[in-house]
């Protein structure tokens, strides 16, 4: 259990991050990490601080610790999966990234950011069909753009299989000025 003083320090480190005092925040979190290596929230905040500093490789073990140590509130756990998955992707650990993002999308199926990062990771793994399916579905589900909405049915068909022969019918209809909704 953290002392009152250390809780104040943790809040101070988070505040510093919001104020863009990233190095100072990281130094405080380093001290708290040394005292509370099993505290999931400290691990999460420390990982985040490394990410902001562009030290992604240093962030990875702390994200894992945050997730594995249990104790994160749901929104923080959701963001820890996103942070870890996107960090692993950024350092080229695509298979590991996919595992984390897949687990994240299982636990948090309504989080579209997790889905998009999973789609990008699939692209990096040269699994283009799966990637485009996820990305198109996210676009369809989240876009408020009237042009996107007007082609939602066609995009939905494309998202199922960009290579499918049926797509030729959609292209033809679009070319002829018909909106296949």
Image (cartoon, grey):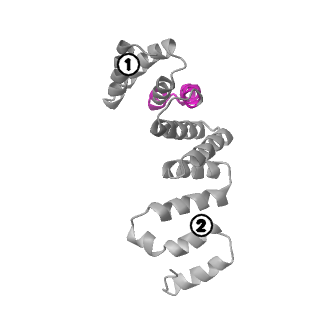
Looking at the rendering, which quadrant does residue 150 occupy?
A: bottom left
- What residue would you read off at disc 1? 7
Nearer the observer, 46 or 168 = 46
Looking at the rendering, which quadrant does residue 85 occupy?
A: top right
Residue contact at pointers 2 and 1, CB within 8 angstroms: no
- Specify few, some or many for label 2: CA neighbours under 10 Å numbering under 14, 14-19, or 20 or more: many
Nearer the observer, 14 or 59 = 14
Q: Which stretch is magenta?
A: 49-67
Residue at mark 2 to residue at mark 1: CA–CA distance: 47 Å
User: Residue at coordinates 33% horizontally, 29% vertically from top-left?
Assistant: 20
**Label 2 element class:** helix
Q: Position of residue 28 (x, y in %)?
A: 40, 17
Residue that sits furthest to the left in the current view: 19
Q: Position of residue 177 (x, y in %)?
A: 48, 86
Q: Position of residue 101 (x, y in %)?
A: 59, 44
31, above or below 177, in the image: above
Decide which of tag 2 and tag 1 comes sooner along the chain: 1
Which numbered tag is attached to residue 121? none
Asked if residue 132 lies left or right of residue 23, the reply is right
Looking at the rendering, which quadrant does residue 99 occupy?
A: top right
- What residue would you read off at disc 2? 159
**Label 1 element class:** helix
User: Residue at coordinates 46% horizontally, 36% vertically from top-left?
Assistant: 76
Q: Is residue 60 magenta?
A: yes
């Amino acid at each position: 259990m953290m002392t009152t003083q250390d809780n104040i320090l943790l809040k101070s480190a988070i505040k510093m991050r919001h104020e863009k005092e990233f190095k100072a925040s990281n130094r405080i979190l380093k001290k708290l990490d040394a005292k509370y290596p099993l505290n999931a929230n400290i691990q999460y905040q420390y990982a985040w601080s490394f990410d902001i500093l562009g030290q992604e490789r240093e962030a990875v073990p702390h994200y894992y610790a945050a997730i594995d140590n249990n104790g994160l509130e749901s929104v923080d756990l959701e963001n820890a999966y996103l942070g870890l998955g996107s960090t692993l992707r950024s350092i080229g650990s695509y298979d590991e990234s996919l595992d984390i993002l897949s687990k994240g999308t299982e636990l948090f199926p309504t989080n579209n950011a997790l889905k998009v990062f999973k789609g990008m990771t699939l692209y990096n793994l040269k699994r283009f069909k799966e990637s485009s399916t996820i990305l198109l579905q996210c676009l369809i589900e989240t876009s408020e753009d009237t042009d996107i909405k007007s082609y939602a049915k066609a995009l939905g068909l494309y998202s199922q299989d960009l290579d499918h022969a049926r797509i030729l019918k959609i292209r033809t209809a679009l070319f002829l000025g018909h909106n296949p909704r």
